Amino acid sequence: MAERDQLEDALRLLLHQSVEARLAQADAGATLKALIETLIATGALPPEAFERKRQHALDDATEALAERPVVKLGKAIDKYALADLPQIDCAQLLPLCQARCCKLTVCLSAQDLDEHVLDWDYGRPYQIRKREDGYCTHSEPATRRCEAYVRRPAPCRTYDCRKDPRIWVDFDKRILTP
């Protein structure tokens, strides 16, 4: 367990460094945008030539980004202190909806990581791990019930499927989105 703790601590450090780097990148992007807009406005940079070169550079950058994971950490809130949670009879709905919500992307919080109960995807830190069928690893395959229900993350606790078009066309009439 100590090795896992060390690995998770190291990954959290990398997350914080990643956030700092992204802020610096946002500042550089804003500076570059202002510079380009000034050059185009003064006529020093032809818009057509700029757009061709920009698109080529964007294509290269998009390809490079697709090869690297994005680190996402859930909000820092106490999931056990949440109030006014949605009142949905999931047990009754499971035979119909097949727990479609358990296929949605969920980012775990530091609280979740500290508990060492929920599995996260090492390729997509800190998103909850999914099986090959697209369901959360904590969704029991036969019944679709949550095996980590008591320790489930805040997004699962606060999620309300009733108005989510990814799940229902009409919740009241029990019409699922195809």
Image (spheres, rainbow, N blue to C red):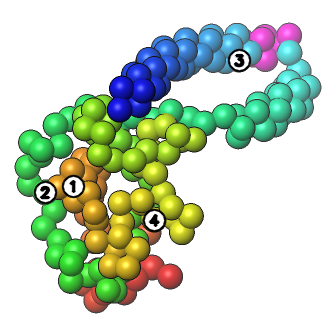
Label 4 sits on residue: 135
| Quadrant in the rendering for residue 32 | top right
Q: Which element type, helix, strand or loop, lies under badge 4?
A: loop
* Residue 129 x/y as whole percent: 46, 51
Q: Using the numbered discs, state the Cα–Cα distance from disc 1 to disc 3 in whole angstroms.
A: 45 Å
Secondary structure under tag 2 reads loop
Residue at label 3?
A: 37
Is 142 on the left-hand or right-hand side of 111? right
State the separation of the CA atoms marked 1 and 4.
17 Å
Residue 148, x across and y down, in percent: 26, 57
At label 3, counting other C-alpha atoms closer than 10 Å, the crowd grade (few under 14, some 14-19, many 20 or more) is few
The answer to whether the residue labelled 1 contacts the one labelled 2, judged by CB atoms less than 8 Å apart, is yes
Q: Distance between the residues labelled 3 and 2?
A: 47 Å
Residue 162 visible from this viewpoint: yes
Q: Which residue is drawn at 21% across and 83% down?
A: 92
Mark 1 or mark 3, which is nearer to you?
1
Q: Is residue 116 left or right of residue 41?
A: left
